[in-house]
Image: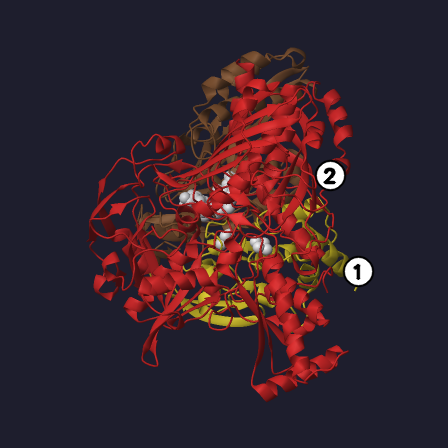
Amino acid sequence: MADRIDLTLTVNGADHRVSVPPFARLLDVLREDLRLTGTKEGCGEGECGACTVLLNGQVVNSCLVPAVQAQGAVVVTVEGLADGERLSSLQAAFLAHNGAQCGFCTPGMLLSATDLINRCPNPSDDQIRDGLAGNLCRCTGYAKILDAVHTAAADTGAPR
Amino acid sequence: MRGYLPDFDVHVPASLGEALDLMAQRPGIFTPLAGGTDLMVVYNAGRLKPTCFLDLSRLAELRGIEEDATSLCFGALTTFTELRECRAVHQHFPNLVKSARATGALAIQNRGTLAGNIANASPAADTPPSLLAYGAELELVSPRGLRRVAYDQFHRGYKSMDLAADELLTRILVPKPAGRGFHYFRKVGTRQAQAISKTCLAAYARIEEGCVAELRIGLGSVAPAPVRARNAEAALLGQPLASLPVAAAREALLADMSPIDDIRATAHYRSVVTRNLLGQMLRELASL
Amino acid sequence: MIGASSPRKEGRAKVLGTAIYTDDKFMPGALHGLTVRSEVPRGILRAIHFGEGIPWGEFTLVTAADIPGTNLVASVVDDQPFLIGIGEEITHSQQAVLLLAHADRHLAEKARRAVRLEIEELPAVLDIQSSLDLQPLIYGADNLLKEIRIAKGDPDPVWAQAAHVIEGEYRTGAQEQMYIEPNAMLSVVEPKNGVLQVTVWGSLQCPYYVHGALKQLFGLPEKQVRVVAMEMGGAFGGKEDYPSVNGGHAALLAWKSAKPVRLIYDREEDLACTTKRHPSRTRLRTAFAEDGTLLALEADFILDGGAYATLSPVVLSRGAVHAASVYRCPHVRIHARAVATNTPPPGAFRGFGAPQSLFAMERHMDICARKLGLDAVELRRKNFLRMGDTMATGQVIREDLDLAGLMDRALTAIGYRDKRAAFALTNPEDGPIKRGVGFSVFMHGCGFTGNGESHVASVAGVEGLADGTVAVLAASTEMGQGKNTVFAQIVAEALQLPVDLVDTAPVDTDRVPNSGPTVASRSTMMVGRILEDAAIGFKQALVQQDFLAEPYTPETFQAAVAKAVATLGSLRCYGQYHRPPGLQWNDVTYQGDAYPTYSWACYAAEVAVDLDTCEVKVADFVAVQEVGRVVNPTLAAGQIEGGVAQGIGWGLWEEVTMQRGRMINNQMTNYIIPTSVDLPRIQVIFLENAHAGGPGGAKGIGELPMDGPAPAVVNALENALGTLRLDEVPMTPDRLLERCEEVTHG
Ligand SMILES: Cc1cc2nc3c(=O)[nH]c(=O)nc-3n(C[C@H](O)[C@H](O)[C@H](O)COP(=O)(O)OP(=O)(O)OC[C@H]3O[C@@H](n4cnc5c(N)ncnc54)[C@H](O)[C@@H]3O)c2cc1C
Ligand code: FES
Ligand code: FES
């Protein structure tokens, strides 16, 4: 019988401490313990990307991360993208282009796209496709998502 | 989530030494855990036997890529993303970059490790064919000491490896190719990304005076484990690029494979397409 | 408003991650429910054994014996039990036998594994042919779930006289909807004011289907059952009929435990047990005159309907009506059958039978063109339906239909002629990459088939709210298609208001009337039309009761609504479906107006095939359609692009692999849907042609894009590779290799 661990982690800028089984999935810690239900579960096998979050600045499938490996980590979820009421440029672009249809892939898609634009401020179609290949969307055929990422990249890319 | 949480415990050693001590004290108890991209899938599906994990992910000794004059040495925890981003890997081992790019998608590449890819011992893993083509060596460490194994001697059958219960895979050493080299890698997956291989062929050849002076071909998904295509290699070694015995090599490749029908492809498909990949590789080689 | 790309109403919540899907709803003290299923395709359930090491006393357990009302899922035919009881017959491998619930979901999983079912196996029927051969008999007197005959003229004398008679057989596989959110249900059953109240929240397309199923399951009157549709992570038909089953299961556990229950399927379970597209086999026989005029058509159309009727009768009906497709033909005979097999029942999936029969016909037309030595474009042009022509059911085309124009538009957009010419030169060269272009022309009937709309008699309404804004009252659900936004646009247009002043009421059967199921591409056209009426009635009520004077501004309208609500307590106005004059349909003879109208389309695809691997890449895709007036161009384009993606997936990759009546590739890693790198950009072109039936002239749009991609892609494959036996989808690389070898090996 495994003892619970005291897990401390920073999520969207806030520090949390929760007691969880060491092999609880980060996905469940976020959804159940922290009640951040924006992160979704579509498969639990690393395929769909609906559970994508940033873990120490990298995109990961939170369904494949055991709590013990998130000890002390900095996590960003979809709930951490907007600045209060102000949508991030990606969120605004997804809204404007209908990049979110049913919206279930959207949280994960937004995090992968955020990471992509951070790494590659002016991505081509192919680079976007590669960056989002781990986020399955069944509604859009991806076209409107590509448009949204281009628009957001153009917004973000402008010198600030 | 079908795994039963209380069945799974974990130890997080602070150093490689501590990890080895733990394994020595309770041999056979621990399951090493690196990026978790294989283990967590099986665990989520409720198909992993109760165990105690040994979390290697915090062991600095197992990280990093070191370069010297003759080789690159990859720490066990080297991720696919690190392979993709390392200049020396691009320069010397383009097949490894292609393998890494072709593995899952970004989220998997960020977490999945080279040692995990090897030690998971899936016949469909995508870096092993490239490692075989480059003549990699594995460094294995146990409380009894350190040993090196040629990678092409490591897999012994389906999910069976030359790896003792108290042993960890610590580093992967790959000699830098010298001279005029030819590199070929192609994975045929179930789709263009986030796909498991139906077949995979990686090759490295050294060309001297218009002939194949050195050749290693690694295959994925066509045998119980990643394998060298020794028969095909033998048919081609020493042959001039101008008149490569393509038909003979394709024929010889049959003896290198023992493909099966599974959910992803038929044995027949694997057999035909792998030979076609060899054909494509030889076309490229001939036009060098 | 209509015609504007208003942003999605619930879009903000979706990009913020605050939209509440079923599994996101917090329910303190909830138990986690799980389902124990038979793994055997057919047999008699003899016993249920509860294994050791599980504190069974802590579990809520439900078997068939516990069911308070009727153990049959309300559907077209009530033949499917919620649970199989001891001594009863198991008829497919995913049949639910036992429900269990516990507060610890991990323990619940462990318990599920500890249950052992004792089943006396019986021989099973696992494919269409065995079912037709009654090997063995498993359903009714003839293994038929439904049989339909459609006749026009008499083909029999034509076969002997015609210059050419061409036959073909075509097959299509099962397809999984693969909504990214798996099926999910929550339930609370508790006494309220002394009577039992059953409530279900879920990911579901048709609240009133679930409502009806729960009434029957518990034997309760309407008022004691409540169904609420949560935000839905995709559906595509996959949450049309199945939610009556898992909704019932969740409610049974909630009732037995007297606690809230969550019944959230994981992907493996969802894939293995929920509905799919029906596998099909179509045999076509066509007679042509020397010049290519189509003289007669006979279609033998068969669907694998699985173990129970579920929606198969209506899926079959749509498939049968679409079997003659867009061609004028004086003599038609269609024989359609849905056969029973011992497999989990398929159900609704975007297209609903039409993609299957249209695949057959559009492949067949290309093959006929080749055999007749005619150009596939010209053969179609010669035979297209036009205004005044009659379809197989005798329906007369009353609109000014220009299919040739539609086709030319698509062919020009993809560069069909130039590409054909270019590929004819490049394909014979050495090298593994062969290219081709192909297309399909097709239609999709809008709304229910035949008298469906009259049977449902949908009601929808608008309601004034205290703040003066207007709420849409309809049980139509939002599954990503844009219903919230489109309905608001339609009502805003009718009331001449900005769209911000209109929103949708939560879809809760306690609050919204039965506007019918959210299926059959009917919401915009059918429900939208009712809403238009309701909105006009609403405005008239405001005027007649002196709250509003015309002309008005949005501000004065809002003030008038606020005042009316304050004065009257509430103000609602409803509209109801009325069959448009002139539409006739006979359910027995299958004669008449099968649909009030049709959407029409031509899709064209360019493919590149790598002969080394038999991998197919769709390099370009054009989708031209006439769907009446487009209410929201951005949302509409999204529907087309998403539908095309699914159609390409069905054509090339998506295969449900069955073994002993069970899906064995029931993981996302092994059921291959397209990723962002597998699809081209899709050129979407709308040709507008206002149709009187829908609001502002709109027709149905949701399912159409599923019909055309598979035949277009496979026709392109034939152009790339020459004459192969390309008669089946998905044309996976393995299958394509086989077909190539048939030619090379003779
Ligand atoms: C969605 C998805 C897509 C994928 N796609 C691909 C793909 O395209 N190609 C491919 O090849 N793989 C793929 N994989 C599999 C997986 O990502 C790789 O095999 C990865 O390299 C595993 O590394 P890991 O560190 O995550 O391994 P873990 O899951 O941590 O471990 C895997 C195995 O290796 C053992 N192990 C790990 N490190 C050591 C060590 N140092 N010494 C001894 N034993 C060790 C573990 O005990 C375990 O048995 C995919 C996985 C997922 C979930
Ligand atoms: S839920 Fe994690 S990848 Fe699908
Ligand atoms: S918007 Fe529905 S899955 Fe992407």
Residue C414 lies, in percent from the top left, at: 74, 36
Element assignment for label 2: helix
- Determine whether B38 is above or below C137 in the image: below
> What residue is drawn where x is 77% and y is 34%?
C415
The chain carrying label 2 is C
The amino acid pointed to by label 2 is: Ala
Position of C209 compared to C682: left or right?
left
Indicate the chain coloured yellow by its letter.
Answer: A
Give the color of chain C as drawn: red
Residue B97 lies, in percent from the top left, at: 61, 38
Specify the quadrant that holds the N terminus of chain C. Answer: bottom right
What residue sits right under mark 2 in the picture? C410
Give the color of chain B as drawn: brown
The chain carrying label 1 is A
Depth order, front residue of B224/C35 = C35
What residue sits right under mark 1 in the picture? A158
Position of C696 compared to A73: left or right?
right
Position of A83 compared to C235: left or right?
right
Depth order, front residue of C709/A112 = C709
- Determine whether C466 is above or below C349 in the image: below
The amino acid pointed to by label 1 is: Ala
